[in-house]
Amino acid sequence: MTLKEASRYLSLHPEVLRKKASLGEIPAKKLGKGEKSSWRFVKADLDRWLSVNKNSNRKGTDENKIIEDLINILKTSDEISKIEDAINSLGIMNIKSAVSEIAKYINSPFEDIRWLSSRALVKMDFGNNRELLYSILLSDKSDKVRIEIASKFAKEGDEYSINYLMETFRKTSDEQEKYNVARRLIMIKPEAIIPFFRTKLHSFNLAIRYRTLCDLRNIGYEGIESDLINMLNERELTIKRKAIEIIGMKKIKDAVPLLQKIIDSENDNEIKKIAAQSIAKIFG
C-alpha cells in the first residue's frame, strides 16, 4: 500500500502516518534513502498492528502529540532540517493553531524555509496574511518564494502577479521551473501557455507527462481530443490509464474504437475495466 492508501485504511492523517512510520511505530518500508523517498505498507503487517492497538484508542492522542511536538520545534529548535519538516508537515495537515509560529519564519535567511512558510500561509490562512504575503512578493529576492505567493494572487486577477509569472515563464531557461510556472498559469493565460504545455505530453520525464495529462482534465483547446487519443498508444500503463479516464470524463466519441480495441486485446484487466467504464460514460 502507498502512504495515502494506508492512511485511509488506518484512518490516520497521512502526515501522522509518515511520522509514525519514520519513528518505527508502524511497520513500513522506505523506498530509497532520501527524505522524499516514498513509504510502502503491507496490509498483513497493518492488520497485526491494528489487532495489537485496537483497544488503545490512541489515534487522537498520537495526532495531538505529533502536532504539539511540531509546533514546539518551531518555537525552540535551530536545526534547519527540523524546522523545514515541521513547517511542511503542519502546512499539509492544515493546523491553523500553528499559523502564528509559521509566520515568524517568512523572513528567514534560508530560502527553503521562506518558501515553505509562504506556501503554508497561502494554504492555511491567506485571508489574514494577505498584506504580509504581498509585501514578501514585492520584496523577496527568491523566485521560488515569489512564484508560490504570486500564484495565489494571480488566481484572484492581480495584474502584478500575472505579469510577474508571465515574465518568469518567458525568461527562465530552466525547463523544470518553466514547467512549474506554466502549470500555475494554464487556467489564467491559456492562450500563451497551451503550446508549451502540449509539448510536455511527450516529455521523457514520466512525472511531467503524467502531471500534464492530469491537468488536461480542467482545460480545453483545439486539438485536445486528438492529443488524448494519441495518449492511448502510451506504453507506460499509468499514463495510459489516466488518458482513458479523462477521455471518458470528456466524452470523446472518436476514441471509442481504440477503447474497444483495448478491451479486446489488452492483458491488463484493470485497464480493460477502465476502458469499459469510459465507454459507458461517453454514451451515458
Image (tube, helix red, strand yellow):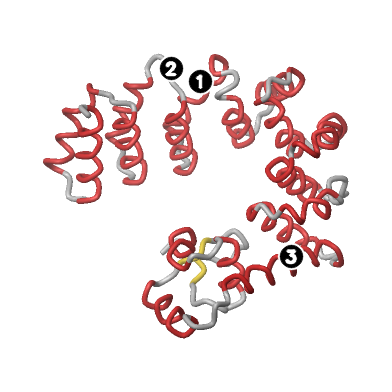
At x 59% / y 58%, what residue is drawn?
A: 36
> Is 15 placed above or below 174 here?
below
Left or right: 235 as drawn, with respect to 163: left
- Judge by depth and name the residue closer to the eye, 272 or 173: 272
**Residue picked out by circle 1:** 194
Query: Which residue does the numbered mark 3 point to in the structure image?
Result: 70
Q: Is 173 in front, or is 165?
A: 165
Q: Is mark 2 on a helix, strand or loop?
A: loop
* Residue at image location 70% in from the left, 45% down from the top: 124
Helix, strand, or loop for circle 3? Answer: helix
What count of labels does the image hold? 3
Q: Earlier in the sequence, mark 2 or mark 1?
A: 1
Q: Which residue type carries mark 2?
A: Tyr
Task: Report the amino acid beneath label 1.
Answer: Ile
Q: Horizontal and vertical percent for residue 272?
A: 20, 44
**Location of residue 86 in the rendering, given as x and y in whole percent from the top left corner:** 73, 60
Instruction: In the rendered structure, find residue 221 and report the number of the disc placed on it.
Output: 2
Percent position of residue 249, x then y: 33, 31
Question: Which quarter of the figure has residue 16?
Answer: bottom right
Quarter placement of the N terminus: bottom left
- Label 3 packing within 10 angstroms: few (<14), some (14-19), many (20+): many
Disc 1: CA contacts within 10 A as few (<14), some (14-19) or many (>=20): many
